[in-house]
Image (cartoon, grey):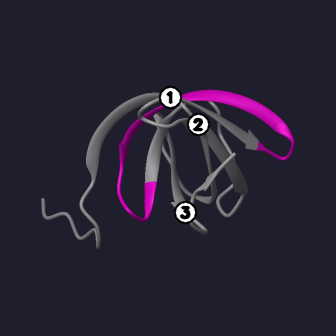
Amino acid sequence: MKDNRKYKRNPYTREVIFTVEGIEYQGVIQNFSVAGMFIKTDEFFSLGTAVALTFPSCDKTKQLKFHAEIIRNTDDGIGVKFLRSREAL
């Protein structure tokens, strides 16, 4: 089956804290691209819901925060699309 994604997905495994409607959840990033990422979680959210993602930088000296929107739900987790550039907290 052909993958019609605009951007290549890169495998990546890292824990992430994400906030939806003021409540913090934990998940595991499974892959990412320049446009978004897939997060493994048992939680279910409505499409279009805003989410804030926080995780440590590669060198673990800063916390990175991304603002995103949920664009996909599966039995394994959620797909999110980044809304703006990352910020260091």
Mark 3 crowdedness (10 Å alpha carbons): few <14, some 14-19, many ≥20 = many
CB atoms of marks 3 and 2 within 8 Å: no
User: Residue at label 3?
Assistant: 82
Mark 2 crowdedness (10 Å alpha carbons): few <14, some 14-19, many ≥20 = few
Question: Viewer-proximal residue, 49 or 9?
Answer: 9
> What mark, if any, has residue 24 been given in the picture?
none
Quarter of the figure that contains the C terminus: top right
Q: What amino acid does circle 1 point to?
A: Lys
Picture coordinates of residue 87, whole percent (x, y)? 63, 56
Instruction: Report the Cα–Cα distance between label 3 and label 1.
Output: 21 Å
Picture coordinates of residue 47, whole percent (x, y)? 64, 59
Q: Main secondary structure of the magenta part?
A: strand
**Of all residues shown, which one is farthest toward the left?**
1
Picture coordinates of residue 7, whole percent (x, y)? 28, 67
Q: Considering only order in the chain, which callout, 2 or 3, is on the residue closer to the N terminus?
A: 2
Point out the stretch of residues depicted in magenta.
20-36
Q: Considering only order in the chain, which callout, 1 or 3, is on the residue closer to the N terminus?
A: 1
Picture coordinates of residue 45, whole percent (x, y)? 69, 46
Q: Which circle, 3 or 1, is nearer the viewer?
A: 1
Q: What amino acid does circle 2 point to?
A: Lys
User: Residue at label 2?
Assistant: 62
> What mark, if any, has residue 60 been given in the picture?
1
CB atoms of marks 3 and 1 within 8 Å: no
Instruction: Report the Cα–Cα distance between label 3 and label 2.
Output: 19 Å
